[in-house]
C-alpha cells in the first residue's frame, strides 16, 4: 500500500511549507492525483487522516481531484484525452494516425492549494 508512504510525504511537505509561511493550523488541502499513479483516493484519505493526527494538519479538509491521462502522439503530435480502457483498446496507438503514443499527463500527485491560519 504505497498510499501510506505518499500520504506521509505529502504531510511532511505541507508541514515544511507551513513553517515557512508561519501557519499554526492547516484548514484545507487540495490535491490532484493522476489516474496512472494507481493511488486509491479512499486509501490515501484514510492514511492521511491517521498520519495527520497530532500535527497541524489534524482535522483539515482534504480535497482530492482525479486527473484523466493525456497522451501525445509521437507521429502527428496530437494530444489525446481518452480514458485508460479506450487507450488499451487502441493498443496504445493514436486514434487519428495509428502512430505510437506516450503518456504526457496522469502520473502526478500535486499539492495545488493549502489553506491555513497564522
Image (cartoon, rainbow, N blue to C red):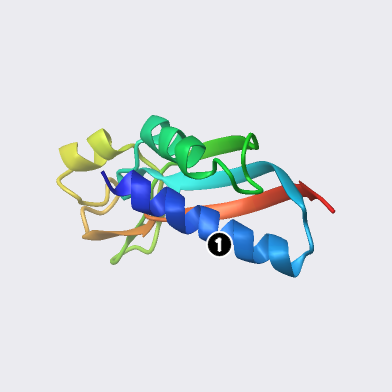
**Depth check: 88 or 23 in front?**
23
In this rendered view, identify the residue nearer to me: 101 or 41. 41
Q: Is residue 48 visible?
A: yes
Total marks in image: 1
**Quick one: label 1, few (<14), some, or many (20+) residues within 10 Å?**
few
**The quadrant where residue 108 appears:** bottom left
Name the side, left or right, on which 29 lies relative to 36: right
Image quarter hosting the C terminus: bottom right
Relative to 64, 91 lies left or right = left
Q: Point out residue 75 in the picture as x, y percentages from the top left corner.
A: 28, 66
State the residue at coordinates (14%, 46%).
91
- The residue tagged 1 is 13
Q: Quadrant of residue 77?
A: bottom left
Give the x, y percent position of residue 17: 66, 64
Q: Is residue 116 left or right of residue 49?
A: right
Q: Closest to the observer: 37 or 23?
A: 23
Which residue occupies the extreme right position in the image?
118
Q: Is residue 58 left or right of residue 22?
A: left
Residue 95 locus on image (x, y percent): 27, 45
Query: Which quadrant would the N terminus be assigned to in this image?
Result: top left
Secondary structure state at the residue bearing disc 1 = helix
Q: Is residue 88 above or below residue 70?
A: above
Give the residue displayed 19% in from the left and 50% down from the top: 92
Using the rendered image of the protein, determine whether residue 36 is visible from the camera's viewpoint. no
From the top left corner, tell me how far across and down residue 19 is, in percent.
71, 65
Q: Residue furthest bottom?
A: 20
Amino acid at each position: 500500500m504505497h498510499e501510506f508512504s505518499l500520504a506521509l510525504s505529502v504531510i511532511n511537505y505541507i508541514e515544511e511549507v507551513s513553517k515557512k509561511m508561519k501557519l499554526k493550523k492547516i484548514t484545507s488541502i487540495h490535491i490532484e492525483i493522476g489516474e496512472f499513479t494507481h493511488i486509491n483516493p479512499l486509501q490515501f484519505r484514510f492514511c492521511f487522516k491517521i498520519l495527520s493526527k497530532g500535527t497541524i494538519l489534524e482535522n483539515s479538509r482534504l480535497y482530492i481531484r482525479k486527473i484523466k491521462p493525456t497522451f501525445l502522439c509521437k507521429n502527428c503530435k496530437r494530444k489525446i484525452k481518452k480514458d485508460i480502457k479506450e487507450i488499451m483498446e487502441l493498443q496504445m496507438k493514436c486514434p487519428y494516425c495509428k502512430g505510437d503514443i506516450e503518456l504526457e499527463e496522469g502520473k502526478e500527485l500535486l499539492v495545488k492549494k493549502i489553506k491555513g491560519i497564522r
